[in-house]
Image: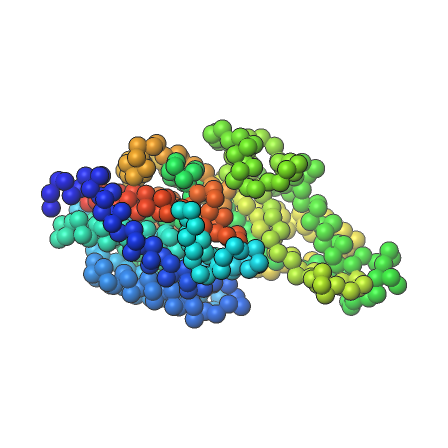
């Protein structure tokens, strides 16, 4: 292996040459509708796991590649299939765990998509499709970077490599801890790269250093034992929709900030971020105001937020003049760093029970809980990753960024591997619209992310612990 083969320019050329194959493989993976939620075909999640396993084996790098299913925590049910792989390190060299997930969100309203959600389509430098960005691109970043590292190093690969491609991240990672506990030998590592976050823009890379936690649950609001004619009894008894909407309104202050006593924010400086940038990133309609107070990024990164993400009630087409006895809503709470998800759950449940109007009956599902995460930026792996991002993006300095979303399992990784340095990277940008219709991936970011990971792994291979 020559020094020329290791220069950034030569590696850039290598990755550029690998891009057509990487994009084709990503399209093939996106075509598999691997929705991990209840009510969707689990065989398609199995199919996507097998896709990943086949390609990991084809790299001929690993001592072991396996597909596993483990019981969900605190349940007898089994989770979705995950793909694990491991190659042991040479003596004195670190092991890197590469994480991504192969499951995706449901497509949602197909009419809101400009193309079929599971038929990937390239338009103006972006690849559209469910999972194209979140997080099947993360899977292909790992696969393509590993292929490049193999081809450059040949027999000189000294670092250990572990791979964990999860199959139920979009459904709460319910068997994540049991997988960690059952397969610690395969997953133990010194550095963990979680490829499931975003970048400040297409042209400015980010390393995610904070994530909000989350609490997600369903709430059923009931006021009547049976449905009744709204004309006969309306105005005398509250129906469940009336009670649910009133209850939801009591979650917020007049300015839209969270009104739940006990949900706390986190104090930390944030970069400037203008209202125009917020409008651009969010699609905020003309005349619709911001909510909350304080710097915009502080509200997004370091303050709690509550969203109602779903409701089970009669559709407009099927609506009749009926007082509805029960309504179920899906509640998503983002928890600021510094507060545990358990504390947040206790606070919001207490608030809802205390503010239920007209004595409405409340029933709560078992919540999905995930803790917030703050990165220790003093580690050597962080410096190495920042250099790799800078070089991959052509000299642009990366941003240390917070993210308003949640990756709850990172707290579990910290618990199981407390000495490991965790790097949260990603391929998304503000236009990716993860979880939404018209989800897309910038192919330019995809290429740079592959190059950055390749640079990181090659440079780490030059270092002994």
| Residue farthest front in this picture | 124
Number of marks present in the image shown: 0
Residue 99 position in % (x across, y down): 35, 53
Does residue 370 sit above or below 252 in this rendering? below
Does residue 362 sit above or below 395 in this rendering? below
Front position in the image: 439 or 75: 439
Task: Please give the name of the residue rendered at 87% of the width and 61% of the height, measured from the top-left corner.
Answer: 231
The answer, for residue 401, to whether it is visible in the render is yes
Residue 55 position in % (x across, y down): 28, 62
Residue 370 position in % (x across, y down): 49, 51
User: For residue 390, what is the image quadrant?
Assistant: top left
The answer, for residue 179, to whether it is visible in the render is no
Position of residue 213 in the picture relative to residue 84 (left or right): right
Query: Which colour assignment does the render follow?
Result: rainbow
Task: Please give the name of the residue rendered at 48% of the width and 70% of the height, measured from the top-left corner.
Answer: 41
Task: Please give the name of the residue rendered at 83% of the width and 62% of the height, measured from the top-left corner.
Answer: 230
Position of residue 25 in the picture relative to residue 152 (left or right): right
Task: Please give the name of the residue rendered at 51% of the width and 67% of the height, measured from the top-left corner.
Answer: 40
């Amino acid at each position: 292996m020559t020094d020329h083969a290791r220069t950034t320019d030569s590696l850039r050329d290598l990755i550029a040459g690998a891009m057509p194959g990487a994009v084709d493989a990503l399209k093939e993976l996106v075509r598999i509708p691997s929705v991990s939620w209840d009510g969707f075909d689990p065989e398609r999640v199995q199919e996507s796991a097998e896709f990943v396993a086949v390609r990991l084996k084809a790299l001929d790098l690993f001592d072991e590649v396996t597909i596993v299913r483990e019981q969900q925590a605190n349940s007898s049910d089994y989770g979705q299939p995950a793909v694990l792989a491991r190659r042991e390190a040479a003596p004195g060299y670190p092991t890197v765990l590469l994480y991504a997930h192969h499951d995706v969100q449901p497509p949602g309203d197909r009419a809101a998509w400009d193309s079929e959600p599971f038929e990937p389509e390239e338009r103006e430098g972006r690849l559209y499709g469910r999972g194209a960005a979140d997080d099947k691109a993360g899977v292909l970043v790992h696969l393509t970077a590993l292929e490049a590292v193999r081809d450059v190093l040949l027999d000189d690969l000294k670092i250990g490599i572990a791979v964990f491609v999860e199959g139920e991240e979009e459904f709460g990672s319910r068997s994540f801890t049991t997988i960690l506990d059952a397969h610690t030998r395969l997953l133990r590592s010194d550095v963990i790269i979680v490829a499931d976050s975003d970048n400040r823009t297409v042209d400015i890379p980010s390393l995610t250093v904070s994530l909000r936690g989350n609490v997600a649950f369903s709430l059923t609001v009931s006021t009547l034992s049976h449905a009744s004619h709204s004309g006969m009894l309306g105005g005398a008894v509250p129906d469940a929709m009336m009670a649910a909407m009133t209850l939801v309104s009591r979650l917020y202050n007049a300015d839209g900030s969270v009104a739940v006593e006990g949900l706390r924010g986190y104090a930390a400086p944030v970069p400037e971020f203008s209202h125009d940038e917020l409008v651009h990133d969010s699609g905020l309609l003309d005349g619709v105001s911001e909510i909350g107070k304080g710097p915009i990024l502080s509200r997004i990164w370091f303050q709690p937020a509550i969203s109602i993400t779903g409701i089970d009630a009669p559709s407009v087409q099927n609506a009749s003049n009926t007082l509805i006895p029960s309504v179920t809503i899906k509640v998503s709470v983002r928890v600021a760093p510094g507060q545990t998800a358990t504390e947040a759950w206790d606070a919001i449940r207490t608030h809802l029970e205390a503010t239920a109007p007209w004595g409405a009956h409340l029933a709560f599902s078992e919540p999905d809980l995930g803790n917030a995460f703050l990165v220790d930026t003093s580690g050597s792996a962080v410096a190495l990753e920042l250099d790799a991002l800078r070089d991959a993006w052509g000299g642009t300095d990366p941003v240390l960024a917070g993210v308003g979303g949640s990756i709850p399992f990172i707290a579990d990784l910290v618990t199981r591997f407390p000495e490991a340095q965790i790097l949260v990277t990603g391929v998304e940008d503000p236009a990716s619209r993860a979880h939404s219709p018209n989800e897309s991936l910038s192919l330019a970011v995809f290429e740079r992310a592959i190059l950055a990971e390749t640079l990181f792994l090659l440079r780490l291979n030059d270092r002994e612990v």
